[in-house]
Amino acid sequence: MERHGDMMILLTSLLVGSGEDGARGEDQLLPRAMGQGALGCKDLTYISGLQYVGSGFTKLVLRGNLLNGKEIALKSVHNGGNDVTRCVRRYGDLTGCGTLATYKLHKEVTLLRTLRHPGIITLHGHCYENSIAPDFRVTAMLELGSPLEMIQLLQTPWEKRFKICLELVNLLHYLANSPMGSIALLDFQPRQFVLVDENLKVTDIDDATMEELECKTDKDCALEFPSRTFAVKCSKAGRCTGINEKRNLFNAYRFFFTYLLPHAAPPALQPLLLDIMNATGDLRYGINETLEAFQNVLNLYKSGMNHRRRLLYLKDYMLIEGYRLNETNDGYRCWPSYNHRGCVLSVHNSEEAAEFCSKNTNCHHFIIGHQRTWTGRLLATFTSSTHKLIPDVNSRVYMKKPSNVKK
Ligand SMILES: Nc1ncnc2c1ncn2[C@@H]1O[C@H](COP(=O)(O)OP(=O)(O)O)[C@@H](O)[C@H]1O
Ligand SMILES: [Mg+2]
């Protein structure tokens, strides 16, 4: 009910305050105009197919189609959300509480207009409506993502989980060196992120701060988390310099790395990953060293992790070039697979695939096509039963030689 109430308010606000009226006053409210082609209030009047996507403490997000069919996300204040309702309960001022929440979204839009990075959600435009006094309404038009589901991510192959962590590290590197100074995300949790085409992007940045704490002594710079506290130095200028970068990094460690990074990682990478875990968990590394360590892992992974050159296992397979199998969903499964109904893994080469197949008794064939993962590794499909071969120039089938098939 609450959701529908808010959706109705948003819809009415779209209809009432859009267009010329809605745009009025915009120039006084914004430091600089958005680039050409940015969406505005007028575009909101043509939005169709509105649907609920998500909501948090302060904001409500809907998806909708622009006139050209493109889908975007619309963020507005969640009047039935905890932030506004708690405030109203406390102060009894509906308009005041709405304005306070609107200010947060306004701040977010302003930040999104300044900060541009692949790890930050793209702002397509915004609509400020001050025509419906005493209300002042803000709608942010963003690229549409899908909420980050940690439970689902835990079931995906390590390579995908590593990508999310690496993208996060790239984002934190940008935030530590942003045009506005070193930025900390105070409300740093997986639910403030979304995936857009499998790329991690932060969407909730109304809690971002560019200020580093003022201090008199080092004691004023204690960086506290539920599990531990870190000492940060108070600079001569009276600031806890570096505290923002450290806060982000430890949050990345506790909310992302611990869940996504070490679990089911390739054995050859485990010592490096353990090092990253220890160094970020103790804040021994800053963001530069962390980024460097992630790049080392990526390079080693791309190189095939010193996979041996001698072909030990491949000789037990017959190669049938230019074919694939017509049905690969034969009940043979492995975990975590790229395909939930079968067994699809990324491999450095056919020898690595042969090794996997030989070590798993029910695996009798594997197929390597032209598809590659984001790191450039090949995708191999493993199967157990015999299938019909279909010509396919982009694919090759490897069959265990009869003498090697255990009965
Ligand atoms: N661009 C987007 N695409 C898809 N879902 C989004 C997008 N932005 C936010 N969401 C979803 O909406 C929720 C609320 O947005 P958020 O900015 O986090 O608001 P709040 O400040 O209330 O926490 C998020 O947790 C996320 O699931
Ligand atoms: Mg949020």
Image: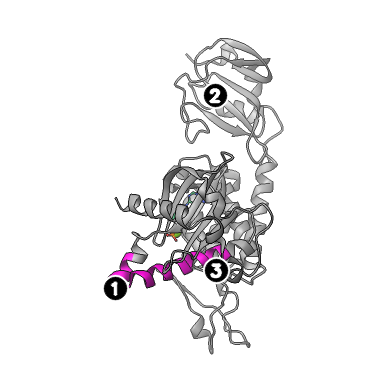
Q: Earlier in the sequence, mark 3 or mark 2?
A: 3
**What SS does tag 2 mark?**
strand
Give the colour scheme of this rendering. Answer: one colour
Q: Main secondary structure of the magenta part?
A: helix
Crowding near the residue tagged with mark 1, few <14, some 14–19, many ≥20 C-alpha atoms within 10 Å: few
User: Horizontally, is 336 left or right of 397 in the view?
Assistant: left
Identity of the residue drawn at 60% across and 22% down: 367
Can you identify the residue that label 3 sits on?
184
| The magenta segment | 85-110
Q: Quadrant of residue 237?
A: bottom right
Residue 352 painted magenta: no
One can see residue 277 in this view: yes
Q: Identify the disc placed on residue 256.
A: none
Residue type at mark 2 is Phe
Q: Identify the disc placed on residue 92.
A: 1
Q: Identify the disc placed on residue 382.
A: 2
Is the shortest distance between ligand 1 and the CB of mark 2 under 8 Å? Answer: no
Where residue 241 sits: x, y (%)?
60, 78
Contact between marks 1 and 2 (CB within 8 A): the answer is: no
Q: Nearer the viewer, residue 215 or 199?
A: 199
Frontmost of labels 3 and 2 is 3
Contact between marks 3 and 2 (CB within 8 A): the answer is: no
Crowding near the residue tagged with mark 2, few <14, some 14–19, many ≥20 C-alpha atoms within 10 Å: many
**Distance in Å between CA atoms under marks 1 and 2:** 63 Å
Q: Quadrant of residue 77?
A: bottom left
